[in-house]
Image (cartoon, rainbow, N blue to C red):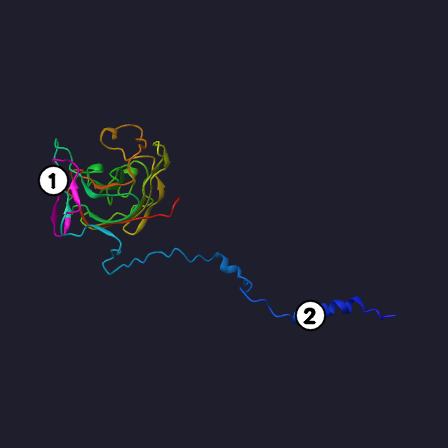
Amino acid sequence: MPRKIPALVVAAAFHAVAVAQPAPTGTPPPRAVAPEKLTEVWSPVPPVVTVPASGIPSDAIVLFDGSNLDAWKPVRADGQLWKIVDGAMVIVPSRAPTPPCDLQTKQAFGDVQLHLEWRIPADVKGSGQDRGNSGVFFMGLYEIQILESHDNQTYVNGQAASIYKEHAPLVNASRSPGEWQSYDAVFLAPRFADDGRLLRPARITAFHNGVLVQHDVALTGPTPNGSTFHQPTLPPYAAHPAKLPLLLQDHRSPVSFRNIWVRPIELPVGK
């Protein structure tokens, strides 16, 4: 009678044969991925932007460098360009009853980063809104106020660095009249549906002389001016093109500008 081989021995023998078999040829099994690697993103690679000593990024569009006004035109067909004095663009104030002569860029923009330097005349006169008044209008519609606000009382949502009639600045970073000042801002244009409905309001973040004065504020609509200036409510949004010119305001004061450039912003889809 044949002797029985214990089941445990049989199993061990089969295991030994299996271990002895050569590894199959072909693609090796996937290696385990370290958990921290799962959060790494390698593409797309952001484009390279260099910033030389001038401070102007390599991908910026220079709108005024002190040499000419080639990037600008009067808003009014019968208007005139402002003058250049010592490398600065200086408003030639229109006098009533002549309408103001704002300037706008020949190129249209949507989402942008803006750098601009401005100066109120050292011998500025007047008070309140009649003291060194001007403004920067994104898309010709949405204004960051320019005003002598170093020692000048007015309503806070109309002082320098305010989003005019909408948002007062977080702080007053104004310098004295005659000193150069700077604005650095990020403007995100409003988004509209095909039927004209507002999908997302315009938003602005701004720095005045390097100090944060507007933090990602949402705008309720265009800046009130012209026929809407004296209305008790702010004008609502109305659908407009995705890109429109940047505008500098003539408010009948010889405000100066220099070193103006923008960087069009390309946000990821859905942002």
Residue found 33% across the figure and 56% down from its top: 47
Of residues 127 and 55, the one nearer the viewer is: 55
Quarter holding the C terminus is top left
The residue carrying mark 1 is: 80
Residue 55 location, x and y as percent? 25, 57
Residue found 26% across the figure and 29% down from its top: 228
Kindly state the secondary structure of the residue where label 1 is placed: loop
Residue 17: numbered disc = 2
Q: Is residue 12 left or right of residue 194?
A: right
Write down the quadrant of residue 58 in the picture. Answer: bottom left
* C-alpha gap between disc 2 and disc 1: 95 Å
**Vertical order, 246 against 44 (above or below):** above
Q: What's under tag 2, amino acid-wise? A: Val
Of residues 264 and 15, the one nearer the viewer is: 15
Of residues 235 and 37, the one nearer the viewer is: 37
| Residue segment shown in magenta | 70-88
